[in-house]
Image: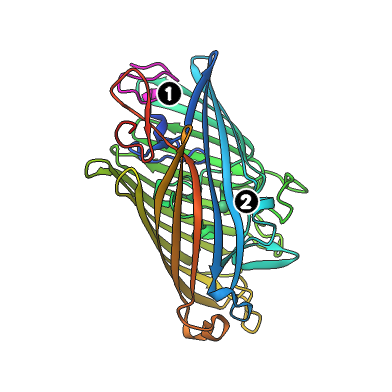
Amino acid sequence: MAMPGMIDSTMHMTGVLSLPMSREGSGTSWLPDASPMMANHFAAGAWDFMFHYRAFVYYDRQNDADPSRRGDDQIGSVNWAMLMAGHDLWSGRLQLRAMMSAEPWTVGAAGYPLLLQSGESYHGRPLHDRQHPHDLFMELAAIYSHALGQNLAFQAYLAPVGEPATGPVAFPHRPSASGDPFAPLGHHWQDATHISYGVVTAGLFSRSWKLETSIFNGREPDQDRTNFDYKGRSLDSYSARFTANPDRTWSLSASYAYFKSPEALDPGLSEQRISASALNTRSIWTSGEWASALIYGANRFQHTDSWSNSLLFESNLAVDAWNSVFGRIEYVAKSAADLDITDRPPEARFDVGSIAFGYIREIARYPGGSLGAGGRYAIDLVPRSLAPLYGSRTPTGFSVYLRFRPRALRSAGTSRMADSPNGTGPAR
Ligand SMILES: [Cu+2]
């Protein structure tokens, strides 16, 4: 049996209970074991380091950049970088993480144009048809895992900023979303809690399941994206999540969360969220890799008695080492308040959807990483009542971009780790 933090005979890095490191998602969430580890790995003394990052530099144009139809365009960059340091401690495993984003500057506080997107605020108004930037500090966390027996272990997660145990793996870390620079329209129904200012999680896990609960600060980040949002807040919200990884290719989860006063613009309101997800990653053809996610998430605010639902399916198919295609189909019930529609009651609901697809071609290698060039096209669907606002029932958006990311760490059957753009097969 491999020791924590060592590289086992199949050249997969393993942790407590010999779980492969490829299983580690955002926060304490799990990915399928078959997921590629897009990272640079190095060691210094008894410390083991993993460096993950992704950066897209885009031109984004929504609804022909026509502001009278809620469109706009922008040149910018969405990006994040994360350093993880692992060390054995008290016969368990300690991991320290720091994850940061330059989006406060490269996107700006008003966010990037994305039709029908909603969530968080800017200058006292709800952000709509734009996706807010991520905060400078996305995660600062310490995770400690310790085996309790042959097939049982506990985990504690302490994060001044981090992700409570709710929802699926956040989209920036999902292999199924690795080609898409933009956030899902259901972000605030599913996985937006990945940046919470104060999180404590405790969990039990075996090799095939994990049960965890969190207390955390439920307030969404404010528009000042470079500070720590603790003012007047405590660990006043809670969540629980169950995850099962029945084999190498699947990860299934279900969760519940209660948020006390999540929205700065409506501090009197509490919110509940339920979600369920199925993630799958598998090899395909000689050197291809196919990752998919099916995600359900629903919110219920205190003053309403019905759930507002969202459903997402996304898939990324790395055809070979150089070519990937991806797509995302979404449905979300958004309120007049979400979309800042002022001539309707704030709780009025609108069924909106989106079909997005794209292609990325790897065009160059650099040490440890790969540069790709791609494009994304989306057709959004709005009800007849919103057509005057958007100029059509099927407004569209497109973007072209460059993507920088590490190549994958993978088994090569030799004494060293090899890498390839998709993590399938040896380096070429
Ligand atoms: Cu986010």
Q: Main secondary structure of the magenta part?
A: loop
Q: In the rendered image of this protein, does residue 341 appear above or below residue 28?
A: below
**Depth order, front residue of 229/6:** 6
Q: Is residue 295 left or right of residue 71?
A: left
Q: Few, some or many C-alpha atoms within 10 Å of disc 1 (few <14, some 14-19, many ≥20)? A: many
The dot on residue 134 is: 2
Question: Are there few (<14), some (14-19), or many (20+) residues within 10 Å of tag 2?
Answer: many
Which portion, as a residue range, is magenta?
1-19
Location of residue 281 (image quadrant)? top left
In reply to whether residue 16 is colored magenta, the answer given is: yes
Residue 410 quadrant: top left
Residue 49 in the image, given as x and y percentages of width and height: 53, 25
Amino acid at dot 2: His
The yes-or-no answer for disc 2 within 8 Å of ligand 1 is: yes
The percent position of residue 378, horizontal first and vertical second, equals 44, 68
Q: Position of residue 408 (x, y in %)?
A: 40, 35
**Residue at numbered disc 1:** 16
